[in-house]
Image: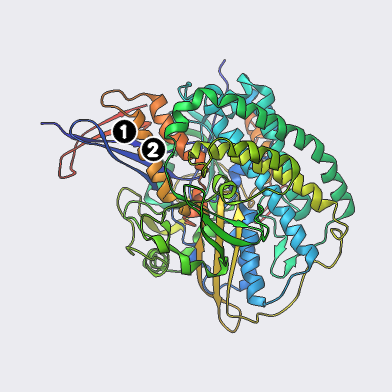
Amino acid sequence: MAERKTIVIDPVTRIEGHSKITIHLDEQGQVEDARFHVTQFRGFEKFCEGRPFSEMPSLMARICGICPVSHLIASAKACDALLAVKIPPTAEKLRRIFGLAQVVQSHALSLFHLSAPDLLLGMDADPAKSNLFGLLEKDPQLARDGIALRKFGQQIIERLGGKRIHPAWVVPGGVSDPLRPEDRDEILKAIPEALTIAVRSIAWFKGTMEPFREEIACFGNFPSLFMGTIKEDGGLTFYDGKIRLVDATGQVVAEGLDPRRYFDFLGEKVESWSYLKSAFYKPKGFSDGMYRVGPLARLNVSDRCGTPRADQELAEFHELQRTAILSSFHYHQARLIEILYSIERLEQLLNDPEILDKHVRALARPNSLEGVGAAEAPRGTLFHHYKIDEQGLIRWCNLIIATGQNNLAMNRSVLQVARRYVKRDKITPGMLNRVEAVIRAYDPCLSCSTHALGQMALQLQLLSPQGAVLDEVVRS
Amino acid sequence: MSKPKLATVWLDGCSGCHMSFLDMDERLIVLAGKVDLVYSPLVDNKEFPPDVDITLVEGAVSSEEDLHKIKAIRGRTRLLVSLGDCAVTANVPAMRNPFTLDSVYDRAYRETATLAPGVPTDVIPRLLPYARPVHEVVPVDVFVPGCPPSADVIFYTLTELLEGRQPELATKTRFGA
């Protein structure tokens, strides 16, 4: 009797979180279904209950060690709404600088430390070499560029916030301390080299794409909606703006949506097999409302970046496809363009005559019992929503995080790659690595998204049609 | 002679300690000359080797899977290091301990869900009733507090351990540092 089999990849490595992938084969050994399971859950939305709202930015930063700055910003914006104040203009500019520095470090981590081994050493490389240290052996310059770009971003965060990870500098009403002239000057000094590295990295990346035609064709290459925040002039932004959605043809589906009213247009569905909920665009329903967020989505919805070099790269990027750019493989290039934009924009903001102003915090007591804060995190749109009581203690909290908004697309991408590469009786590391690599393209941040012994490299389970495990093979 | 084997694992934490590890920047290259990173979220080996010299553990023990992993890892590691406040005290993950598990699940999967509300249970590990620090579950050899411990502290700790010395951390890092 032919049996159904399940291939399990556990843990998925070189991503930021805990997950496994199961690939379900039918009686003929063809891929029937594939699922991306997120296995961590932390309960931030519940355990913040009873805490003073002013603690929220620092507490919520602990959702994620990779993008704590995004949580600080979205949380502080939700708290600004509770205070019902307009923060000083310099505070807003300093928060923007903080956010852009994080985009550089987080995108550098994703591209160089986590995905570049696949791009440089190949999808079929020896798993023992597919990492940053293998990269250092093969192309020391590229690996050092990745380390340097990440360091550039982290050092800005350290200069402004006092430490690289979980700084307490972003607070309700603004930021706690102004920018010191010597710190501004040191950051400005580092910009030319960072720009050189960014430009060199884009050239390298564009030169590596050719051998990946097959991957580009099946790495999440399907129609979906794309969502992102844009400025009033349609330009790219990470801090504040209105939400736009485009469809696969690039046509605008919705425009001018207020992120503070996210619950009117976004829904979340629970799947019994993952701690990560799946977000969808409500007017299209589940699952037609599947949308993608993050670098690729932002470049698909934005009319322009707004800085000269990044706009030049964006124009070239759009030549890849006349409609919206659909393959999730292109998240990598989008990430590099956003790095370039961020460095250019950092320079503009640091040269702003107001940037050293000492007035950086608006003080008030809570004036509203409910507040929503939203921002573009490196991985996509982030929402924090709090309700407090008269004493300012948190009574209710909801978070919608980028990775959950890519969940439907990630699952469909895993299925697409599995159908292309996983064939009966031919299970190779390269094939399984491609299934993981498509997940890496989305740069999921799973500790974020679920606020929530890798003994087997590969586990094959033989399941009866009723789902009982008949046999199990484990190999390393 | 082969280099000492280093592993890093991530239980219930935010990955901030791993990011602080990466904040060693160019010193990662120095480290690569001294040790082999044999198991980590940063490399692809999916099986924890039987004879690891030093394992850095980030995060608290919160799920059945965390518990299973850390017990297996303890048996295969010479020096187990609790890295960061979540491993050392259970810190932020333990903030859910005063609440019932059901109420924590309900907020995320019933009250704030739009479609198909219900607690996920298939394939994924169940949470334990309480998040606990690593040393409540297995013996720990070295404690490195901090949220996260700085890259300097991590580099110092590893250097001392590789030289066969016990790191003197009391003046270098603390809870919340």
Circle 1: residue type: Gln
Residue A164 seen by the camera = no
- Horizontal placement of B20 versus B88: left or right? right
Q: Residue at x 43, y 30 (%)?
A: A433
Total residue callouts: 2
Circle 2: residue type: Asp
Residue A229 seen by the camera = yes
Chain where mark 1 sits: A
Q: CA distance from mark 2 to mark 1?
A: 8 Å
Residue B70 higher or lower than A349, as above or below: above
Residue B159, given in percent of the width and then of the height, sits at 67, 32
Chain where mark 2 sits: A
The numbered disc on residue A10 is 2
Residue A114 sits in quarter:
top right
Residue A32, given in percent of the width and then of the height, sits at 26, 39
Q: Kindly identify which residue carries mark 1.
A: A459
Q: Earlier in the sequence, mark 2 or mark 1?
A: 2
Residue A152, given in percent of the width and then of the height, sits at 74, 41
Q: Nearer the viewer, residue A172 or B116?
A: B116
- Horizontal placement of B114 versus A336: left or right? left
Residue A226 higher or lower than A142, as above or below: below
Q: Nearer the viewer, residue B91 or A447?
A: A447
Residue A270 higher or lower than A347, as above or below: below
Q: Nearer the viewer, residue A230 or B125?
A: A230
Q: Secondary structure at mark 2?
A: loop
Q: Secondary structure at mark 1?
A: strand
Residue A108, given in percent of the width and then of the height, sits at 64, 38
Quarter containing the N terminus of chain B: top right
Residue A352 sits in quarter:
bottom right
Quarter containing the C terminus of chain B: bottom right
Q: Residue at x 72, y 73 (%)?
A: A86
